[in-house]
Amino acid sequence: MKEVSVPLLAYAHCALDTQAWTDLVSNITSLSPTTIEDDPRPWLGWGQARAQSDRLSVFLHEATHHWCFTSPVAFAIAGLTLRARVGIARALQGEEHMQFSILRDLISADTAVALLRPLAEGLALFAEFDATSRLRSKAISPILQSIFQFFVDLKRSADLFRRLPAEVAIAQTIAEALYDLRTNEVTLNRKASLLLQPFSLNAGGYLPGYLAVKSLWRAACRKHFLLANETDLFLMYLRSYIYDDWGFVATLLSEELDEIRSVEAIVNHLNGRIRQWDELSDQDFSEYENSLATDSSSRPSPLPGLGVSDSAAGSGKQRLNNLTSELVEAAIANDSMTTGISAWSANILQRRQFMNLASVPVQVCTNSNGLPEVQWRRTSMFTPTRSDFVAEPKDSVGDAHLEIVFALIQDRFERAAVVHRDDKVLVCAPIGMKEHASDTRESVLRAFLRRSLVVEAEKAMRALVENVAGKSWFQIPMDHCKSQIDSIVDEFFKDLSLRFARDYDSIDNCAAKMSQKGLRPILNSSSLIKGLALLGLATSLNPQRIFIEEIFKKHGLSLSQTLDQLSNAYESWGYPPRIGYVENTLFTTV
Amino acid sequence: MNTDSHLEIVGLTEIELLEFEEECHDQVIQRSPANASRESEHGDLGLTAAVVILTAAAVQGLAVWLAKRRVEDIKLTNVSITKGADGSFQMDLSRLEHGKKTESPDAQVVRALRSQLTELLQLDTKP
């Protein structure tokens, strides 16, 4: 098939617009329209979003991004971007000395985003296709816990809760939801499509990122064998190892002004962390897991077992505090443009913890009982209580907008339906336990920014930065650094992602072969690609051969034929890595 | 057969595109360029699009491909076909149900789909 762009396809990106996304700076998320065609109702109740499995896939993917970006490292990257914008405002008002720090901040943030993007995608895909908790798990990630909020039919699970202790019943219902997800055709299609993505960072880094995360998982299993089954614990550990790394924060926010040295330090830090991965011990993973089992308010920071020294952590915390203070202080400076941008930056940092589940136009009406209710497409959605009203009920009647926001704060999920008219909040209705309603309302209202404003303002801010950078001398060093970073990141992920290939020649050959069409040149047929995808999905649920054979049968595929063909591919190419056999169980790195 | 006509199929996943190619054998299929995310946006896996020159073999391949997805009547499913100003066609499959597949579709269904496609895509099948 030819890889060409033809005029007819000039508008074809419209199909790609259906993608969900998460923005690292604002941490704003878009789940629609791919998920529920803007119908907000499933997000208001418990377990009501379960009807379509692609909705769960998209949710797991974007919620994992959001979770990763609610972290010290992502906060620092967002802070660098926001500080560069404030610097641009000051430079435009005559403070020309700001240009060097703007350049350094922009390049540092770009480098970190480029380096972390494949890992961010890899973690999100691992959450979709691999992460599973076990009954004996000491902790469950907020991602899998949130499945219980939205995607578990409590009526169907009622019997389980009667028979079993609550933690076991919760784990069991999550496992059932994951079984439904990972054994259906849509998910198989999705994972097979991932394996056909280019092995290149220019295409979003999905395949290199996923394979990198799987390689790290396989390496971790050698140290702590329980991780072979405790994939959710691995997901939590790797997310913490990368995004809760206060040493990385210290490096990102270093006072080094030379942009080249800053880039080197960032690349070297991540390189060092990946090398350090092989030195982790069984004890590191156990300490980390035990710390998660404690109450969140008494957990140390950084968490134990992550290989972050106290001095690096102290330095990172200090620098992040300084950066936040700098932005807050600039927000009250006596200069309209700088103040405006700084105030916006401070607001963005405050709202980052909230994930947007839905955002739709609604009407606030008075129902037949004379009570105000919120309607969507002329059907009643909910009736706010008196304490839910932020504005006077009579002033709330009319067209408005609904946003449903969600966050994990401490050990508790907070969810609320916020009805607003432009920037004025009319109603804030917490969803969940009544005893937490007041706290939830308070934290939501403190940080709430309407979604459309965030999206539009962020676009405008980025356009301003691009415009100013494009006209200034620092576009040249920025372009130079970007081209260098791209080749560094490509090389970095080639070795990490294909680490378990047969030898170095196989790594080089397969990276080149897979650069355009992923595993297609190696596996050749759609049935083998689906077979490999299904092998990973099925083993994530249960690695026993008899179970996997059943799942293959369900999809009209042959397990033994798939294993034979994969073995042939390994003989020819040295990749994908050999399937591991331990007694009657299988182990796959893809 | 009007060999100048093109059909663009949008809303395909990568694996669907490969399966479509496998049904079309030697037909030339062109694809859209890969999507690129904005700097700080982390997007979901995207969909892709393919362009195929409208030939009898391509329509046969498409009919088999749809029949394997248990589509029995295009007009009754979430498949839309629109004609552009330049005479080319666009088929949107992004709303097609991804239900259970069959590897051996009914030959009658394939014939019926081929006939519908021929009509909808205004193919001239005269010798």
Image (cartoon, rainbow, N blue to C red):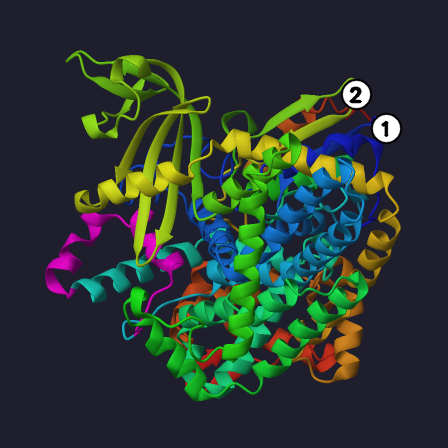
Residue A549 on image: x %, y %: 43, 70
Furthest residue to the left? A162
The crowding category of the residue bearing disc 1, from other C-alpha atoms within 10 Å (few below 14, some 14 to 19, many at least 20), is few
Residue A530 on image: x %, y %: 57, 61
Residue at 51% across / 65% down in the picture?
A317
A431 displayed left or right of B54: left
The crowding category of the residue bearing disc 2, from other C-alpha atoms within 10 Å (few below 14, some 14 to 19, many at least 20), is few
Q: Nearer the viewer, residue A89 or A581?
A: A89
Residue B87's mark? 2
Identify residue type, mark 1.
Asp
Question: In the picture, residue A218 is in which quadrant?
Answer: bottom right
Magenta residues (range): A137-165
Residue A507 on image: x %, y %: 75, 77
Q: Secondary structure beneath disc 2?
A: loop
In the rendered image, which residue does mark 1 sit on? B4
Q: Where is A354 relative to A302, above or below?
A: above
Furthest residue to the front? A334
Question: In the picture, residue A175 is in which quadrant?
Answer: bottom left
Labels 2 and 1 touching (C-beta < 8 A): yes
A384 displayed left or right of A555: left
Q: Nearer the viewer, residue A129 or A231?
A: A231
First reached walking from the N terminus: tag 2 or tag 1: 1
Is residue A395 inside the magenta stretch? no
Is residue A139 inside the magenta stretch? yes
Residue at 37% across / 76% down in the picture?
A289
Question: In the picture, residue B116 is in which quadrant?
Answer: top right
A380 displayed left or right of A547: left
Are the residues under marks 2 and 1 on the same chain?
yes
A541 displayed left or right of A515: left
Q: Where is A3 relative to A169, above or below?
A: above
Q: Nearer the viewer, residue A406 or A83?
A: A83
Q: CA distance from mark 2 to mark 1?
A: 9 Å
